Amino acid sequence: MPESKLQWIEDEIAVLKKQGLFTNIRTLESPQGARIVVNGESKLNFCSNNYLGLANDPRLKKAAQDAIERWGVGPGAVRTIAGTMSFHLELEERLAEFKGAEATISFQSGFTANLATIPALVGKGDVIFSDELNHASIIDGCRLSRAKIIPYKHNDADDLQRAVKEAKPFSKALLVTDGVFSMDGDIAPLDKLVTVAEEHNLIFMVDDAHGEGVLGHGGRGIVDHFGLHGRVDVEVGTMSKAFGVVGGYVAGKRTIVDWLRQRGRPFLFSSAVTPADVAACIAAVDILEESTDLVEKLWNNGRYFKQEMQRMGFDIGHSETPITPVMLGEATVAQKMSQRLFEEGVFATAIGFPTVPKGKARIRVMLSAAHSSADLDEALGIFKKVGQELGII
Ligand SMILES: *Cc1c(COP(=O)(O)O)cnc(C)c1O
């Protein structure tokens, strides 16, 4: 018998399991919320990106239901052929207004927004300056473009300046960074980066997936947070995190948005999100425009949780946002802790290589406006118990 041609995959999986790097995917049996049902049991949920608790909000659900009645369930075609409903344009206009941007184009996801945008802006012979810790979808977008990728040190504008000088001469160049780095919760120094971009005439793009609905006035994002309206060319956002739905978008210069309607490949060759998604997204924008309450609750929950974890002696890194990494080092320790937390009633995922560097495994705790203070106190009690049991605190 010849060895199976897929044996190597089984071998690789065995290695992952041994190293504590194999992802066991848990199945939810309830909507997203502060508490979710897994394996028939209720758990406190600390791993979703549902920052504002909108994923199961009755206003979003009602909007989606009404949209299905009026528009049906599917978009029918890619947007350039027959799949652009007036509804898709309404969402784009509402987002541009909310963000204070010239224009917006929506995509199926944040991931496809990056895949669409980067290759549309730079190509063979061009240069991309990319933060060394950028998200996988940025990295893939960069690779698809066939431009030369030059990484610079994480959040280091001086190293960027050095890299730009070394790379000269170049004709066209893009600077791209995550806004909030989701594994550590730190924020890109946009004010410093924009100065370098302006000095060297770089197209400047920020992926604000974890900043939308979180940073800036009432969740208007990282450009608003730094007061840089009009100085950042491209702001990528997602509707799948704080907005609680699904979909991605690019907000920024009208010229770029117009160009992406002609050259953004996922826009041209893949159908748009459904009417129900669009309606729910518009309802989310309505809620954020009406009040800053949810965003404030998210930040208050984050501050309280981080302060209490630190008081107990956990190493929670250097997050500047409600994302709270609990640094544990070895992947096997992080997996063990996540497992024990789960048994005690807290769902918080262990994250290891390749999502974070080797030896920097952690539990990433995601706070949400959906959590009540009783939820937070219950979780803190369980963290304390498990942390002591495993000798971490
Ligand atoms: C989550 C994330 C994405 C992907 O967004 P989706 O809408 O889920 O595809 C892209 N970029 C960054 C920085 C992210 O954190």
Image (spheres, rainbow, N blue to C red):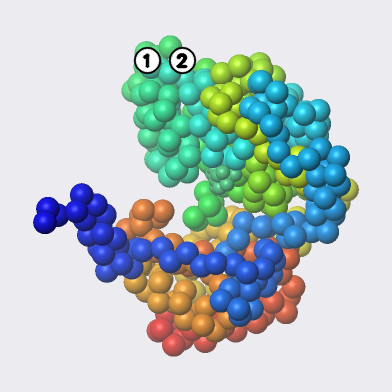
Up-down relation of residue 138 to residue 353 (above or below): above
Q: What element carries label 2?
A: loop
Q: Residue at x 41, y 71 (%)?
A: 334
Q: In which quarter of the image is the N terminus?
A: bottom left
* Residue at 77% over, 29% down: 85
Label 1 near label 2: C-beta < 8 Å? yes
Q: Picture coordinates of residue 117 (x, y %)? A: 55, 27
| Residue 270 on image: x %, y % | 58, 31
63 left or right of 11 in image: right
Residue sticking out furthest to the front: 1
Tell me the quadrant of ligand 1.
top right
- Asked which secondary structure carries label 1, the reply is loop
Residue sitting nearer the eye, 129 or 66 = 66
Residue 126: quarter of image: top left
Please, what is the three-letter code of the amino acid marked with disc 1?
Gly
Mark 2 and mark 1: Cα distance apart in space: 8 Å
